[in-house]
Image (cartoon, rainbow, N blue to C red):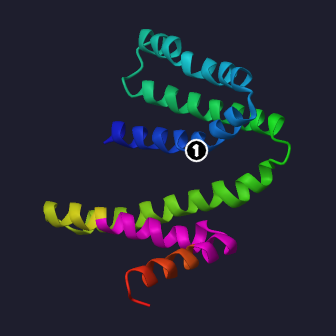
């Protein structure tokens, strides 16, 4: 269970990186970006080796990876600010990190409650998967999207409904 949770945390942190990488690559500063970012990735191997030599448990590898991912993300943000002047740390935190964190926490709490209250394994997995998707979609619409994004989503949804003949 611990390994799964640590992998999920790592994957969540890593999912933040792709948009930043695309912006930096589009600006043409690939080398200046990848060298400092990948240093942290490469440091995982010696750091893990040292921890294992000191007798730390196997899951410490994932903790090292998570720390490296957070450090790499900080470097990504610094590079983004350097090469894309319009980027704002406070706006990034306010409009992206906080809503994403809220969606993750609320969904996790709901899923934890459902998971611990249903004893039948088949019903539990179906319910958890279904409610995970529903919670993320609903919370993203209400918490994660700006008014402009909600308006675009409404337009796309009405176009879709017209095409399939409902409206």
For mark 1, what is the residue? Answer: 16
Q: Position of residue 27 (x, y in %)?
A: 75, 34
User: Compared with residue 134, is residue 100 higher up or lower down, i.e. above or below?
Assistant: above
Q: Secondary structure at mark 1?
A: loop
Q: Quadrant of residue 122?
A: bottom left
Task: Look at 29% across and 62% down and name the residue there.
Answer: 129
Q: Residue furthest right?
A: 85
Q: Position of residue 11 (x, y in %)?
A: 46, 40
Task: Look at 45% across and 84% down and name the residue there.
Answer: 162
User: Compared with residue 164, is residue 78 higher up or lower down, i.e. above or below?
Assistant: above
The question of residue 137 being in magenta is answered with: yes
User: Compared with residue 51, is residue 99 higher up or lower down, i.e. above or below?
Assistant: below
Q: 82 or 39: which is nearer to us?
A: 82
Q: 79 or 3: which is nearer to us?
A: 79
User: Compared with residue 57, is residue 115 higher up or lower down, i.e. above or below?
Assistant: below
Q: Residue furthest bottom?
A: 167
Q: Position of residue 107 (x, y in %)?
A: 44, 64
Residues shaded magenta:
130-152
Residue 33 is left or right of residue 3, and the answer is: right
Q: Position of residue 144 (x, y in %)?
A: 60, 66
The question of residue 116 being in magenta is answered with: no
Residue 124 is left or right of residue 146, and the answer is: left
Give the main secondary structure, helix, strand or loop, of the magenta stretch.
helix
Q: Quadrant of the C terminus?
A: bottom left
Task: Look at 74% across and 29% down and name the residue there.
Answer: 28
Residue 42 is left or right of residue 92, and the answer is: left
Q: Quadrant of residue 43?
A: top right
Q: Quadrant of the N terminus?
A: top left
Q: 129 or 64: which is nearer to us?
A: 129
Task: Look at 52% across and 63% down and name the residue there.
Answer: 103
Q: Label 1: how many residues lie within 10 Å, few (<14), some (14-19) or many (20+)?
A: some
């Amino acid at each position: 269970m611990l390994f799964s949770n640590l992998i999920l945390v790592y994957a969540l942190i890593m999912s933040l990186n792709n948009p930043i990488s695309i912006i930096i690559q589009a600006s043409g500063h690939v080398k200046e970006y990848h060298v400092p970012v990948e240093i942290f990735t490469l440091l995982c191997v010696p750091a893990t080796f040292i921890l294992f030599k000191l007798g730390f448990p196997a899951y410490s590898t994932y903790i090292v990876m998570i720390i490296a991912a957070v450090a790499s993300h900080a470097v990504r943000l610094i590079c983004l600010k350097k090469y894309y002047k319009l980027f704002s740390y406070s706006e990034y935190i306010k409009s992206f990190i906080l809503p994403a964190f809220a969606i993750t926490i609320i969904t996790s709490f709901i899923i934890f409650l459902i998971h611990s209250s249903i004893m039948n394994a088949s019903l539990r997995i179906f319910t958890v998967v279904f409610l995970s998707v529903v919670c993320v979609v609903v919370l993203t619409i209400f918490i994660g999207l700006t008014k402009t994004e909600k308006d675009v989503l409404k337009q796309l949804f009405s176009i879709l409904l017209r095409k399939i003949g409902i409206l």
